[in-house]
Amino acid sequence: MPKETRLVYSTESGRIRSDSSVCSSNPADSVVRVRRETKGRGGKEATVVWDVPGGEAELKTLGKSIKQRLGTGGSVKDGQIVIQGDHVAKIMEFLGSEGFKVKKAGG
């Protein structure tokens, strides 16, 4: 066993190793996912977009442009763009025209 080992997990404080060793993915290789949700929204439909490459500022800019394009409301939180209503096909078309790889998730 090598001498230079370090603590990875402790029962006192949980995970010790930082996640900085995780390699970051190439934004050109990432796939943006789109799905329709009704759960937890009082039966109302919402379209959720996640796995968007970039930071929080890019996410807010993209969310704003989607809302303007569709003429509907929505929000950006927790790394997801939530758009009111069922707009999966329109959002997939818009993101494809913006140069993103898009996949429909769910049913």
Image (cartoon, rainbow, N blue to C red):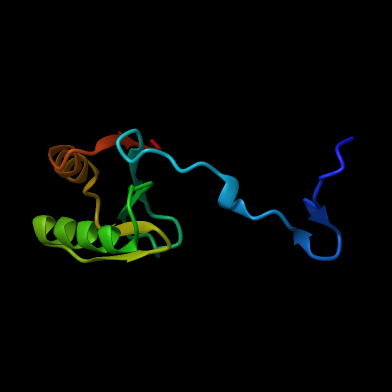
Image: 100 above or below 59? above
Left or right, 11 with respect to 86, comes to right
Give the quadrant of residue 56. Answer: bottom left
For the C terminus, which image quadrant? top left
How many badges with numbers are in the image?
0
Q: Position of residue 86 (x, y in %)?
A: 24, 50
Task: Look at 59% across and 46% down and name the residue there.
Answer: 21
Q: Position of residue 44 (x, y in %)?
A: 33, 60
Give the quadrant of residue 106. Answer: top left
For the N terminus, which image quadrant? top right
Q: Position of residue 63 (x, y in %)?
A: 23, 59
Task: Look at 34% across and 33% down and name the residue there.
Answer: 29
Task: Look at 17% across and 55% down and name the residue there.
Answer: 66
In-front residue for pair 3/39: 3
Give the quadrant of residue 101. Answer: top left
Left or right, 85 with respect to 38, comes to left
Q: Position of residue 92 (x, y in %)?
A: 21, 40
Image: 57 above or below 98? below
In-front residue for pair 40/49: 49
Left or right, 50 with respect to 7, comes to left
Single out the residue that lies furthest toward the right: 1
